[in-house]
Amino acid sequence: MSGVEAFSSKGGIQVIARAAAILRALKNQREGLSLGQIATRVGLPRSTVQRIVGALEAERLVIAASPEGGIRLGPELHSLAEGARVDIIELARPYLVALSRETGETVDLAIPRDDRLIFVDQIPGTQRLRAVSSIGEAFPMTTTANGKACLALMNDKAARAFARAEWKSTGARKRDIDAFMVEIAAIRRHGVAFDENEHTDGISAVGVAFADAGGAMFAISVPAPSARFVKNRSKLIAAIKRARDMINASLAPAADDP
Protein backbone atom coordinates (compact mmCIF):
# COMPACT_ATOMS: atom_id res chain seq x y z
CA MET A 1 0.00 0.00 0.00
CA SER A 2 1.40 3.39 -0.95
CA GLY A 3 1.70 6.28 1.50
CA VAL A 4 -1.21 8.06 -0.20
CA GLU A 5 -3.40 4.94 0.00
CA ALA A 6 -2.51 4.43 3.66
CA PHE A 7 -3.34 8.05 4.46
CA SER A 8 -6.63 7.75 2.57
CA SER A 9 -7.52 4.53 4.38
CA LYS A 10 -6.74 5.97 7.80
CA GLY A 11 -8.59 9.17 6.97
CA GLY A 12 -11.63 7.23 5.85
CA ILE A 13 -11.68 5.20 9.06
CA GLN A 14 -11.37 8.41 11.08
CA VAL A 15 -14.31 10.01 9.27
CA ILE A 16 -16.46 6.93 9.89
CA ALA A 17 -15.53 6.96 13.58
CA ARG A 18 -16.38 10.67 13.85
CA ALA A 19 -19.68 10.20 12.03
CA ALA A 20 -20.55 7.34 14.39
CA ALA A 21 -19.73 9.53 17.39
CA ILE A 22 -22.06 12.24 16.07
CA LEU A 23 -24.89 9.75 15.53
CA ARG A 24 -24.44 8.39 19.07
CA ALA A 25 -24.51 11.93 20.47
CA LEU A 26 -27.91 12.41 18.84
CA LYS A 27 -29.39 9.21 20.28
CA ASN A 28 -32.43 9.92 22.49
CA GLN A 29 -32.25 13.64 21.63
CA ARG A 30 -35.84 14.10 20.44
CA GLU A 31 -35.53 17.87 20.23
CA GLY A 32 -32.20 17.65 18.41
CA LEU A 33 -28.88 19.35 19.09
CA SER A 34 -27.19 22.38 17.55
CA LEU A 35 -23.89 22.00 15.71
CA GLY A 36 -22.16 23.64 18.66
CA GLN A 37 -23.73 21.23 21.14
CA ILE A 38 -22.71 18.27 19.00
CA ALA A 39 -19.17 19.61 18.69
CA THR A 40 -18.90 19.92 22.48
CA ARG A 41 -20.21 16.40 23.08
CA VAL A 42 -17.93 14.68 20.56
CA GLY A 43 -14.89 16.89 21.14
CA LEU A 44 -14.49 18.04 17.53
CA PRO A 45 -14.22 21.49 15.91
CA ARG A 46 -17.57 22.94 14.86
CA SER A 47 -16.38 23.18 11.24
CA THR A 48 -15.57 19.45 11.21
CA VAL A 49 -18.95 18.60 12.70
CA GLN A 50 -20.70 20.82 10.14
CA ARG A 51 -18.94 19.04 7.26
CA ILE A 52 -19.77 15.57 8.55
CA VAL A 53 -23.36 16.51 9.40
CA GLY A 54 -23.77 17.82 5.85
CA ALA A 55 -22.72 14.44 4.46
CA LEU A 56 -25.04 12.61 6.88
CA GLU A 57 -27.92 14.89 5.88
CA ALA A 58 -27.37 14.05 2.21
CA GLU A 59 -27.93 10.38 3.12
CA ARG A 60 -30.91 11.23 5.36
CA LEU A 61 -29.10 9.73 8.35
CA VAL A 62 -29.73 13.03 10.15
CA ILE A 63 -32.34 15.72 9.48
CA ALA A 64 -33.27 19.15 10.76
CA ALA A 65 -35.04 18.90 14.10
CA SER A 66 -37.23 21.95 13.41
CA PRO A 67 -37.44 24.98 11.11
CA GLU A 68 -35.58 26.94 13.80
CA GLY A 69 -32.57 24.65 13.62
CA GLY A 70 -30.99 21.72 15.39
CA ILE A 71 -30.15 18.24 14.13
CA ARG A 72 -31.70 14.90 15.03
CA LEU A 73 -31.48 11.33 13.78
CA GLY A 74 -33.06 10.83 10.36
CA PRO A 75 -35.51 8.32 8.84
CA GLU A 76 -32.87 6.35 6.99
CA LEU A 77 -31.43 5.20 10.31
CA HIS A 78 -34.85 3.87 11.32
CA SER A 79 -35.03 1.99 8.02
CA LEU A 80 -31.61 0.45 8.61
CA ALA A 81 -32.57 -0.41 12.18
CA GLU A 82 -35.68 -2.22 10.97
CA GLY A 83 -33.50 -4.44 8.79
CA ALA A 84 -31.28 -5.25 11.76
CA ARG A 85 -34.30 -5.93 13.97
CA VAL A 86 -35.55 -8.64 11.62
CA ASP A 87 -32.29 -10.52 12.22
CA ILE A 88 -32.63 -10.11 15.99
CA ILE A 89 -36.19 -11.42 15.89
CA GLU A 90 -35.02 -14.50 14.01
CA LEU A 91 -32.06 -14.94 16.34
CA ALA A 92 -34.19 -14.63 19.47
CA ARG A 93 -37.01 -16.94 18.39
CA PRO A 94 -35.43 -20.29 19.40
CA TYR A 95 -34.79 -18.89 22.87
CA LEU A 96 -38.37 -17.64 23.11
CA VAL A 97 -39.67 -21.06 22.06
CA ALA A 98 -37.49 -22.75 24.70
CA LEU A 99 -38.66 -20.25 27.34
CA SER A 100 -42.32 -20.93 26.52
CA ARG A 101 -41.77 -24.69 26.66
CA GLU A 102 -39.99 -24.42 30.01
CA THR A 103 -42.66 -22.26 31.63
CA GLY A 104 -45.77 -23.32 29.71
CA GLU A 105 -46.61 -19.62 29.39
CA THR A 106 -46.93 -17.20 26.48
CA VAL A 107 -43.70 -15.38 25.63
CA ASP A 108 -43.66 -12.02 23.84
CA LEU A 109 -40.93 -10.06 22.06
CA ALA A 110 -41.46 -6.31 21.71
CA ILE A 111 -39.60 -3.21 20.53
CA PRO A 112 -40.05 0.45 21.49
CA ARG A 113 -41.24 2.53 18.56
CA ASP A 114 -41.83 6.26 19.00
CA ASP A 115 -43.74 6.45 22.28
CA ARG A 116 -45.20 2.94 22.41
CA LEU A 117 -44.12 -0.68 22.74
CA ILE A 118 -44.89 -2.84 19.67
CA PHE A 119 -45.20 -6.62 19.89
CA VAL A 120 -43.20 -8.19 17.04
CA ASP A 121 -43.22 -11.89 17.92
CA GLN A 122 -45.06 -14.24 20.23
CA ILE A 123 -44.94 -17.88 21.30
CA PRO A 124 -48.36 -18.90 22.70
CA GLY A 125 -48.30 -20.84 25.96
CA THR A 126 -49.65 -24.33 26.43
CA GLN A 127 -51.81 -23.54 29.47
CA ARG A 128 -55.60 -23.68 28.94
CA LEU A 129 -55.92 -20.21 30.48
CA ARG A 130 -53.21 -17.99 29.04
CA ALA A 131 -52.48 -14.36 28.16
CA VAL A 132 -52.24 -13.66 24.43
CA SER A 133 -51.81 -10.37 22.56
CA SER A 134 -51.70 -9.65 18.84
CA ILE A 135 -48.51 -9.14 16.84
CA GLY A 136 -48.31 -5.45 15.98
CA GLU A 137 -50.36 -4.42 19.00
CA ALA A 138 -49.09 -1.30 20.80
CA PHE A 139 -48.77 -1.01 24.57
CA PRO A 140 -47.72 1.76 26.97
CA MET A 141 -44.24 1.61 28.49
CA THR A 142 -44.80 2.65 32.10
CA THR A 143 -47.41 0.05 33.06
CA THR A 144 -45.98 -3.03 31.32
CA ALA A 145 -43.13 -5.26 32.46
CA ASN A 146 -41.37 -5.21 29.10
CA GLY A 147 -41.88 -1.45 28.77
CA LYS A 148 -40.41 -0.74 32.20
CA ALA A 149 -37.48 -3.03 31.39
CA CYS A 150 -36.76 -0.88 28.33
CA LEU A 151 -37.00 2.33 30.35
CA ALA A 152 -34.42 0.88 32.75
CA LEU A 153 -31.95 0.70 29.85
CA MET A 154 -32.26 4.48 29.40
CA ASN A 155 -30.50 7.03 31.57
CA ASP A 156 -32.54 8.68 34.34
CA LYS A 157 -33.14 11.90 32.42
CA ALA A 158 -34.52 10.10 29.36
CA ALA A 159 -36.64 7.69 31.44
CA ARG A 160 -38.16 10.55 33.46
CA ALA A 161 -38.96 12.53 30.34
CA PHE A 162 -40.51 9.51 28.66
CA ALA A 163 -42.67 8.62 31.66
CA ARG A 164 -43.96 12.18 32.07
CA ALA A 165 -44.73 12.44 28.34
CA GLU A 166 -46.61 9.13 28.35
CA TRP A 167 -48.71 10.03 31.38
CA LYS A 168 -49.58 13.37 29.81
CA SER A 169 -50.43 11.98 26.36
CA THR A 170 -52.50 9.05 27.64
CA GLY A 171 -54.29 10.99 30.35
CA ALA A 172 -53.14 8.41 32.89
CA ARG A 173 -53.72 9.12 36.54
CA LYS A 174 -51.11 11.38 38.08
CA ARG A 175 -48.23 9.35 39.46
CA ASP A 176 -45.24 10.11 41.64
CA ILE A 177 -42.31 10.33 39.22
CA ASP A 178 -39.76 9.91 42.02
CA ALA A 179 -41.42 6.71 43.21
CA PHE A 180 -41.51 5.47 39.63
CA MET A 181 -37.79 6.16 39.22
CA VAL A 182 -37.10 4.17 42.40
CA GLU A 183 -38.80 1.24 40.68
CA ILE A 184 -36.69 1.79 37.54
CA ALA A 185 -33.53 1.80 39.68
CA ALA A 186 -34.60 -1.52 41.23
CA ILE A 187 -35.12 -2.98 37.75
CA ARG A 188 -31.56 -2.00 36.84
CA ARG A 189 -30.22 -3.68 39.98
CA HIS A 190 -32.17 -6.92 39.66
CA GLY A 191 -32.40 -7.15 35.87
CA VAL A 192 -36.14 -7.84 35.75
CA ALA A 193 -39.31 -5.73 35.67
CA PHE A 194 -42.85 -6.52 36.75
CA ASP A 195 -46.41 -5.64 35.83
CA GLU A 196 -48.65 -6.91 38.57
CA ASN A 197 -52.23 -6.14 37.52
CA GLU A 198 -51.12 -2.69 36.29
CA HIS A 199 -51.94 -2.82 32.60
CA THR A 200 -54.69 -5.46 32.74
CA ASP A 201 -56.46 -6.51 35.91
CA GLY A 202 -55.93 -10.20 36.55
CA ILE A 203 -52.80 -10.44 34.37
CA SER A 204 -49.25 -10.11 35.68
CA ALA A 205 -45.94 -10.34 33.83
CA VAL A 206 -42.19 -10.39 34.24
CA GLY A 207 -40.02 -8.68 31.63
CA VAL A 208 -36.39 -8.18 30.66
CA ALA A 209 -34.76 -6.02 28.02
CA PHE A 210 -31.55 -6.02 26.01
CA ALA A 211 -29.96 -3.92 23.29
CA ASP A 212 -28.20 -4.93 20.08
CA ALA A 213 -24.84 -3.56 18.94
CA GLY A 214 -26.55 -0.55 17.40
CA GLY A 215 -28.36 0.35 20.62
CA ALA A 216 -31.82 -0.80 19.44
CA MET A 217 -33.83 -2.10 22.40
CA PHE A 218 -35.82 -5.32 22.59
CA ALA A 219 -37.90 -6.68 25.44
CA ILE A 220 -39.10 -10.14 26.39
CA SER A 221 -42.07 -10.68 28.66
CA VAL A 222 -43.88 -13.65 30.13
CA PRO A 223 -47.48 -12.76 31.05
CA ALA A 224 -49.78 -15.06 32.99
CA PRO A 225 -53.00 -14.97 35.01
CA SER A 226 -52.02 -13.29 38.27
CA ALA A 227 -52.83 -16.23 40.56
CA ARG A 228 -50.58 -18.55 38.54
CA PHE A 229 -47.93 -15.84 38.20
CA VAL A 230 -47.64 -15.46 41.98
CA LYS A 231 -47.33 -19.23 42.40
CA ASN A 232 -44.59 -19.56 39.76
CA ARG A 233 -42.90 -16.17 40.21
CA SER A 234 -39.41 -17.45 41.11
CA LYS A 235 -39.41 -19.99 38.29
CA LEU A 236 -40.49 -17.38 35.72
CA ILE A 237 -37.83 -14.91 36.87
CA ALA A 238 -35.04 -17.47 36.63
CA ALA A 239 -36.20 -18.73 33.23
CA ILE A 240 -36.56 -15.32 31.58
CA LYS A 241 -33.18 -14.16 32.90
CA ARG A 242 -31.53 -17.27 31.44
CA ALA A 243 -33.19 -16.62 28.07
CA ARG A 244 -31.98 -13.01 28.05
CA ASP A 245 -28.45 -14.03 29.01
CA MET A 246 -28.32 -16.62 26.21
CA ILE A 247 -29.52 -14.06 23.67
CA ASN A 248 -26.92 -11.57 24.88
CA ALA A 249 -24.24 -14.24 24.59
CA SER A 250 -25.29 -14.99 21.02
CA LEU A 251 -25.07 -11.28 20.19
CA ALA A 252 -21.56 -10.90 21.63
CA PRO A 253 -18.70 -10.89 19.09
CA ALA A 254 -16.48 -13.93 18.97
CA ALA A 255 -13.30 -13.66 21.03
CA ASP A 256 -11.13 -13.81 17.91
CA ASP A 257 -13.06 -11.09 16.07
CA PRO A 258 -10.97 -8.01 15.24
Image (cartoon, rainbow, N blue to C red):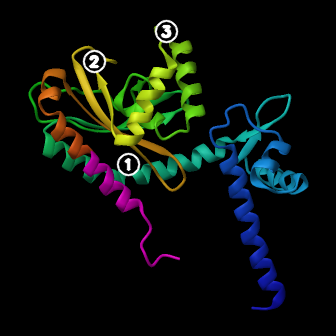
**Mark 2: secondary structure:** loop
Q: Quadrant of residue 91?
A: bottom left
Q: In this view, does 48 lie to the left or right of 125?
A: right
Region of the chain picked out in magenta, as a range: 241-258
Front tag of 1 and 3 = 3
Question: Which residue lies under the disc numbered 1?
Answer: 89
Q: Quadrant of residue 145?
A: top left
| Residue type pointed to by label 1 | Ile
* Mark 1 neighbour density, 10 Å: few (under 14) some (14–19) many (20 or more): some
| Residue type pointed to by label 3 | Lys
Q: Distance between the residues labelled 2 and 1?
A: 27 Å
Do the numbered discs 1 and 3 sit on residues whose CB atoms are within 8 Å?
A: no
Camera-nearest residue between 156 and 95: 156
Question: Which residue lies under the disc numbered 3?
Answer: 174
| Residue type pointed to by label 2 | Asn
Q: Residue 197 carries which label?
A: 2
The tag earlier along the polypeptide, 1 or 3, is 1
The tag earlier along the polypeptide, 2 or 1, is 1
Of all residues, the one furthest to the bottom in this rendering is 2
> What percent of the width, then of the height, locates residue 209?
39, 42
Camera-nearest residue between 25 and 84: 25
